[in-house]
Amino acid sequence: MILSYIYTALIILISLLVQGHSSFDVVRIAGVKPDLMFIAIVYLSYCFGSFYGEVTAFVSGLLHDAVSNSPLGLLTFPKVAVAFVVGMFGRSLFKNNILTTSLLLFAASLVKGFLTLFLCYVFHEASASSILSIILPESFYNALLAPPLFFIFDKIFERELEREGYM
Amino acid sequence: MEFIIRHKSVVAFISFTLFCIISLSIQSSTLVLTLEGVISAITMPFQKAYDGAQGGVSRLWAGFTELTEVRDELKKTRANLQKYESMAGEMSELKRENDRLRELLGMKERVEYASIPATIISKDPDNWFRTIIINKGSGDGIKVNMPVIAYQGGQKAVVGTVIEVRGSISRIAPIISPTVRIGVKLQESRFPGLLCGYSGNSNLCKMDYISRAAYIRFNDMVITSGQGGVFPPGLLVGTVIKSYSLESSAYQRAIIKPVIDYNLVEDVFVIKKDLEKDLFEIFDEDKEKEKEQ
């Protein structure tokens, strides 16, 4: 299991650095960039269960909040909530294939987006236009990237998942 | 204890949720800010290392691929240099004439500010916030509210303003962010307005409170007015791409395309300019009045 922790830490750190680097702006479509870290969290919750996903979501959410200009907790809570739900019901609702993986990420990104919007409304600044300008495009983008990234993560965690009896 | 272990995911979810809600409720407290600072300090070396490594690889690759381009550019640059050298004498003469006329008219002298060059090491990883992190901080003399400019396409223009400073990094809010507001004016007609980001993820800005008497044309240049005390006057901001009158308002609105492309900017200059003192005094007086009431 120790290898899983190391891989998880590396994936989270690399996705945060890549996502935050100025050159990553090149991949913006309709003004948004994909949330690689979130895709990784959904994958981990889906494969390793709720608790593993929640802890990863909490730690990576805090890192995300510290690097971003958001108040501490604003980007953490939606990730934790999605990790909890995906870990609880993900495997029973979605089977691991290209279409369902995209659907899972699309639904998860929508939930994350609306939770972030709600928290922005309560604790920060929010505009309903964010639904069209951020939430929907980002959900589509994440859904599009989910199958290839899930494939890569499957390869990385293959042995660990087999050993732990998740496969 | 057994209950907690059996339901650890529910317990973890409740604990993490409580942490987030408490942290959001007391977001301006020293404890939360310190915690954020500590986490930020942990990630900062990785950001710097990644930026350094990425930059190194890009430079190495560029060394192989861009040699012919560099040779052509060198030729062009040499030709330009000769042209600019001949202009320098002309410019100094114009400057002297300008200074003399300003003196005759009793106008205030234009202040030249020193600037600190910096490199962007990271941008906000999320789509909800748009900030830039640079590799210079309080140790280099950077303070909150200092204006930031950059050069792109041979033009010097506004990037944003410093909103957070730590030891060796600073955070900049770009002008495309809806939270940044700058006093600007149309360069030709001199009508003033207030500029802020158009929306959360757009690369455009909007200029509000422009008088209905103003005739706004496509491609009109927008410059800083110097009002507000943050930006020096006369800095290039962007060009007008659209304008319309608001039905419910006595003003016009213009949509501005910034000169500096947020997605492409890599190096910036922080202008060493503090907020104007008289503004601080006004704020202090207001605060004192509020206290008295």
Image (tube, helix red, strand yellow):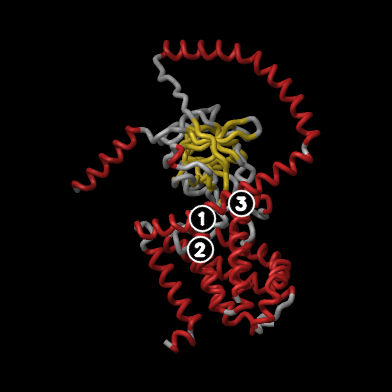
The amino acid type of the residue labelled 3 equals: Tyr
Q: CB under 8 Å between callouts 3 and 1?
A: no
Rendered image: mark on residue A75: 2
Rendered image: mark on residue A68: 1
Q: Which residue is mark 3?
A: B50
Q: CB under 8 Å between callouts 3 and 2?
A: no
**Disc 1 on helix, strand or loop?**
loop
Q: Position of residue B96 (x, y in %)?
A: 51, 11
- In the image, what residue occupies the spot 43% across and 41% down? B138
Work out which residue is located at the far front of the displayed protein and give it.
A2
* 2 or 1: tag closer to the N-terminus: 1
Establish if A52 lies above or below A27. Answer: below
- In the image, what residue occupies the spot 66% across and 53% down? A28
Closer to the camera, B205 or B216? B205
Q: Quadrant of the N terminus of chain B?
A: bottom left
Do circles 3 and 1 both sit on a common chain?
no
Distance Cα–Cα, label 3 vs label 2: 23 Å
Q: CB under 8 Å between callouts 2 and 1?
A: yes
Quarter occupied by residue B275:
top left
Closer to the camera, B146 or B224? B146
Work out which residue is located at the far right of the displayed protein and give it.
B68
Distance Cα–Cα, label 3 vs label 1: 17 Å
**Disc 3 on helix, strand or loop?**
helix
